[in-house]
């Protein structure tokens, strides 16, 4: 199972700094969401030219606002700038509140999906569809917040506030309800190094082929989390 990290920031320089920190920690793949702070593929092209020894992915670029040909051109251009097959293009539908409410339009990497839901429903259904179509086993990326910490309660409290919106977006709320969770804090992987490493490792058992970590907590907690993720990434690369 590959281990990558979600990065972000308001502008190119913060993203480049976050990617460099991930590379220094030993990680070899960074994922960027397409939100409102910048165009993800453009930022990836810049960061990838400055930091050549790391792969990049988008998690995810909404399909509705971009014509497929435009998105294909952007992806091909970014891939050419990076070279060596370093771009992993993730696309998705986004949400009604964004596509209709913010952009005025009508309208699987997972985020906020509990491991049990991935193993019971998501991974099996995607795999069955691929088999029926005569295609190889699909990649299943699982994105979750993660923290190496001795104060789990503080991290969960922070997560409940930081990710509160996901408890109101219908698609995420359905995932949380299906898992019997009260809110987004319920999917956070938090604890000491051994517990976090074990819970990340267990994701492979439910069908995940990649873990997209989103470190949460104080700066010290995020740094410690990144260090562990780098260690796990290096171990996975040689196993």
Image (cartoon, grey):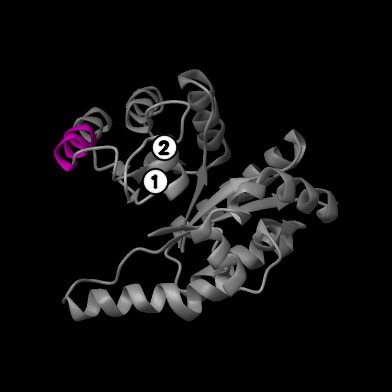
Please state if 123 lies on the left or on the right of 7 as rendered: left
The crowd level at tag 1 (other Cα within 10 Å; few <14, some 14-19, many 20+) is: many
Q: Which mark is on residue 91?
A: none
Q: Report the span colored magenta.
A: 68-76
- Would you say the residues marked 1 and 2 are in contact, meaning their CB atoms lie under 8 Å apart? yes
Query: Quick one: 184 or 8, which is closer to the camera?
Result: 184
Magenta segment main secondary structure: helix
Q: Looking at the picture, does residue 149 appear above or below residue 219?
A: below
Estimate the x, y position of residue 176 in percent, counting from the top left: 60, 66
Q: CA distance from mark 1 to mark 2?
A: 6 Å
Please state if 180 lies on the left or on the right of 79 as rendered: right
Estimate the x, y position of residue 121 in percent, counting from the top left: 45, 78
The residue located at (65%, 67%) in the rendering is 198
Element under disc 1: loop
Q: Which mark is on residue 60?
A: 1
Query: Quick one: 215 or 37, which is closer to the camera?
Result: 37
Is tag 1's residue or tag 2's residue first in the polypeptide sequence? 2
Is residue 30 visible from the viewing direction of this image? no
The residue located at (57%, 62%) in the rendering is 173
**Residue bearing the label numbered 2:** 34
Estimate the x, y position of residue 178 in percent, counting from the top left: 57, 74
Please state if 181 lies on the left or on the right of 200 as rendered: right
């Amino acid at each position: 199972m590959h281990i990558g990290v979600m990065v972000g920031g308001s502008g190119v320089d913060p993203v480049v700094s976050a990617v460099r920190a991930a590379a220094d920690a030993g990680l070899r793949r960074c994922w960027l969401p397409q939100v409102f702070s910048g165009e993800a593929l453009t930022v990836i092209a810049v960061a990838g030219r400055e930091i050549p020894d790391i792969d990049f992915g988008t998690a995810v670029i909404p399909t509705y606002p971009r014509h497929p040909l435009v998105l294909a051109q952007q992806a091909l251009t970014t891939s050419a700038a990076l070279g060596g097959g370093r771009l992993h293009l993730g696309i998705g539908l986004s949400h009604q509140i964004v596509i209709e409410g913010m952009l005025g339009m009508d309208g699987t990497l997972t985020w906020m999906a509990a491991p049990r839901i991935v193993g019971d429903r998501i991974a099996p259904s995607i795999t069955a569809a691929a088999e029926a179509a005569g295609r190889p086993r699909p990649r299943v990326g699982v994105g979750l917040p993660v923290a190496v910490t001795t104060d789990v309660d503080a991290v969960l409290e922070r997560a409940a506030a930081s990710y509160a919106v996901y408890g109101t977006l219908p698609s995420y709320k359905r995932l949380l309800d299906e898992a019997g969770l009260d809110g987004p804090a319920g999917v956070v992987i938090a604890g000491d190094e051994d517990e976090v490493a074990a819970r990340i490792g267990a994701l492979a058992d439910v069908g995940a082929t990649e873990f997209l970590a989103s470190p949460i907590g104080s700066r010290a907690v995020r740094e410690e989390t990144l260090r562990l993720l780098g260690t796990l990434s290096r171990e996975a690369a040689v196993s």
